[in-house]
Amino acid sequence: MASSAAPRVAARRRTRATKREYDDTCCEECGSGEFGSELLLCDHCDRGFHLFCLRPILPSVPVGSWFCHSCSSSSSKNINKTTIPRFPLVQTKIIDFFRIQRSSQSVCQADIHQKKRRRARSLALTSKKKRRLLPFTPSEDPARRLEQMASLATALTTTGADFSNDLTYIHGMAPKSANRPAYEKGGMQVLSKEDTEALNLCKTMMKKGECPPLMVVFDPLEGFTVEADKCIKDMTIITEYVGDVDYLKSRENDDGDSIMTLISAANASKSLVICPDKRSNIARFINGINNHTPEGRKKQNLKCVRFDVDGEARVLLVANRDISKGERLYYDYNAYENEYPTEHFV
């Protein structure tokens, strides 16, 4: 790393500005103007960031254009709402998009809801000793569920992503064998049998076309975001965070704004992240809070928790209080790690 006495130069080549213009540039994260050779400039706003102050840390200057988190995030928010191609509200198209089991159409919905109610009660009975996770309760109106799924299909189609409700392991990235919770620094909590059953029930309901009671909406400031479409109880499983699994070391130069930690290993080379840019579910559109302000923390109504589920690390988003209908969902992107800056979050 360069010393503070090193001449101040921009880490990126510039064609429209002179070196003198960067003499007063300071890092937006630490406020220091030292280590000039490590100061990376955004190609849009010209603000400076030390390579070692970014999260994830950048080992070197990226090849090609580089944009700070605020500018890269704003690009997705500049979508004109009137130009978003709405996914057609056609049952057959939605069934194909989400690969819903067609045989489920003959299943009596009343029987399914009765089974879910019995399951929910059995979970609640054990809450005196330990709070159990609850499976989500879908909206009862099938037409409303189609609208909810269509809103998610619209967001995925607009952002160029395919729907997936599972972690995916792609050739050339991290293999499934690398997802070992034992690598987690300090250990990873194991999801109990009861909570695993609740998670599996959520997965089963999704396969039958019974989705969480959530609506993806477009906001000019926040971009795509998620609202509760009915009241949701505290400790309800909202969704699993899914996408392609990769090594963190392979994503240190990635400009994706939704990469999620899967394993934070004692050996950094074994750390894994979830990348939802190509394959994802509704978790991709749930926004993080600015946890540096009291107002931001008040928004939080979900918690992000990593669990060992049958020997595989998984990330769940769970309600951490009762959520009202129409309330937008927010979680602390850092979970309990506090590794990433969130000042730029709305």
Image: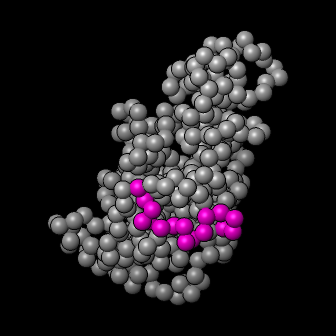
Provide the major secondary structure of the magenta segment: loop
Residue drawn at the location 48% of the way across and 33% of the way down: 343
Residue 273: x and y in percent read 55, 56
152 versus 73 height, above or below: below
Q: In this view, does 309 lie to the left or right of 154?
A: left
Is 181 included in the stretch rendered in magenta?
Answer: yes
Picture quadrant where residue 3 is located: top right
Work out whether 317 lies above or below 308.
above
Q: Is residue 220 visible?
A: no
Q: Which of 141 and 222 is in front in this view?
A: 222
Instruction: Residue lying at the far right in this picture: please name it.
Output: 15
Specify whether 82 is left or right of 125: right
Q: In this view, does 297 lie above or below 164?
A: above
Pick whichever, 99 or 18, lies toward us: 18
Q: Does the magenta stretch include residue 33?
A: no
Is residue 121 at least partly visible in the picture? Answer: yes
Magenta residues, start to end = 170-185
- Residue placed most toward the observer, 169 or 229: 169
On the image, the x and y values in percent for residue 283 come to: 52, 57
Image mark count: 0
Could you tell me which residue is drawn at 44 percent across and 65 percent down? 181
Asked which colour scheme the image uses, the reply is one colour
Compare residues 110 and 220 and report the one nearer the observer: 220
The residue at the point 70 percent across, 36 percent down is: 61
Q: Residue 321, position in %: x, y?
A: 31, 52
The residue at the point 35 percent across, 39 percent down is 298
The N terminus: image quadrant: top right
